[in-house]
Amino acid sequence: MGHLFNPKLFTVLKQGYSKQQLSKDIFAGIIVGIVALPLAIAFAVASGVSPEKGLVTAVIAGFLISVLGGSRVQIGGPTGAFIVIVYGIVQTHGLDGLMISTMMAGVFLILFGLMRLGSLLKFIPHPLVVGFTSGIAVVIFTTQIKDALGLEITNLPADFLPKWGSYLSELSTFNPFAVGITLVTILITVYFRKVTTKIPGSFVAIILITALVQLFKLPVTTIESVFGEIPNNIQLAFPSIQFDQLGNYLAPALTIALLGGIESLLSAVVADGMIGGNHRSNTELIAQGVANIVTPVFGGIPATGAIARTATNVKNGGRTPVSGIVHAITLLLIMLFVGKWAKLIPMSCLAGILIVVAYNMSEWRSFASILKSSGFDILILLVTFFLTVLVDLTYAIQIGMVLSALLFMKRMADAGTKTELEVDSDVLENYGDLPAGLAIYEVSGPFFFASAKQYCSTLKKIGQKSDVLIIRMRHVPFIDATGVHNLKDVITDLHHIKTKVILSGVRAEVLQELEKNDIVNLLEPGMILPGFDLALQKAKAFAASKPIDK
């Protein structure tokens, strides 16, 4: 367990921690706390929950992920990727359903870590990740149009196409003040970094625009007019769990867990590249799991590692988990002492911030480059993208994973399948004339369920026309139950028509499977040979002792 769960914070403290690094971490933590403030509020509002839930998540989850995590610099909290899934769960199952789904996702994440799946989650295909990330970006942008334009729509449809239909039909109700605020927010958020990178543009935009709206009494909706007062304390809340209903939350919980796992490990990998470190992926998953079990109890929403905030942490000198802890404390202090004024933030200002987040998430350059690659990758990208936008993120991830696996298996089967070996001049030169009635077939690649049927039908065809069949297996790394079953059938069928079967170049791990499954006993003694030379000698001996009658 110690090897599986070994938080970086404890390693850092054991190695020694200088005052100089402490001051850098405190500075980076305060900056990241300021960056996280508008994002935490905006992500909560866009997810269909009240603003303080985003702040609570950034405080509680941010603290736990830094204390228990496997990365030196990972910053945890609510992220844009969860907006779509959280909104969907709240609409379908309510806040209690969201809490239960998040806590179940936490349990799944801990199990992923204990089962050492940290390294496995890194192998999620790139087109799949880009597909659902770009899809989420489009959905986030779509959800913000109402507030960005100040449209007066009371019942906004949940689905993508009806939503745009509603926007177009109500376009005449737009509020010019809201449009102006959205545009100014976007400009400040994007271009303020040219003034300084120490203070985020989104934070400056919120302070400046909220002050102007109050000063000039501009007629725009604010957090207060939509959500009322923002509590400036953290309260415990437990969901009422009906155990017979838990099955309803399995799919959303698994989606949260997969999304959280993938995003946190991607963020940790990006951070490793920036600091030249190595994160502990299974420890990171367990920490994310604990954070997602605990945070809902305090009224929070799903959390994961946040790439943008983690990068901000590194750029400002953060090098240990202490900066993440300081970021959580900074947000807690802001929430307790300044939170009551957050209710004055205009909704169109949050919309502007989220439109920038959506653009940064869109990965349009990666999207465009994948469209130039293989047909399989394009298919995975587009299916995942359109399912995320038009149907549901849960289905997008599930179907995308299954499709990726099927296409991978097809590629493996295509790469491995070879026709009967043609006897080229090198073979003739090395081994002399091959006897009549001898066939050679090479299996190249895994002998598994995707390719086994194809291999075995070819083996039968070749074997039926031959007296001796040499099956070369030097390039077979493993054989699964389907491969074993089909190979047994082939050997049995060929024995009935008196064709001798010789296996050559069988690897130790494959031989172990053949022995376990009695294939060795199906063959005549001495028919499994380590090299092709020996197999050929054996085949020539058979040919010499038996007249050809086929």
Image: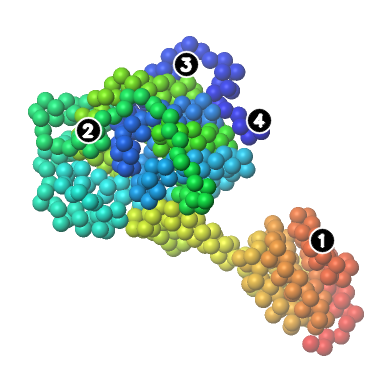
Q: Residue at x 57, y 67 (%)?
A: 414
Three-letter amino acid code of the residue under disc 4: Gly
Q: CA distance from mark 4 to mark 2?
A: 48 Å
Task: Give the residue at mark 3.
Answer: 21
Q: Is residue 511 left or right of residue 128?
A: right
Which comes before the other along the chain, label 4 or label 2? 4
Three-letter amino acid code of the residue under disc 1: Glu
User: Local crowd at mark 2 within 10 Å, few (<14), some, or many (≥20)?
Assistant: some
Q: Is residue 353 left or right of residue 71?
A: left
Q: Secondary structure at mark 1?
A: helix
Residue 296 percent coordinates (x, y)? 44, 35
Measured along the vertical axis of the image, is residue 418 above or below residue 18?
below
Q: CA distance from mark 1 to mark 2?
A: 72 Å
Residue 373 percent coordinates (x, y)? 42, 58
Task: Give the residue at mark 2.
Answer: 224
Residue 232 percent coordinates (x, y)? 32, 24
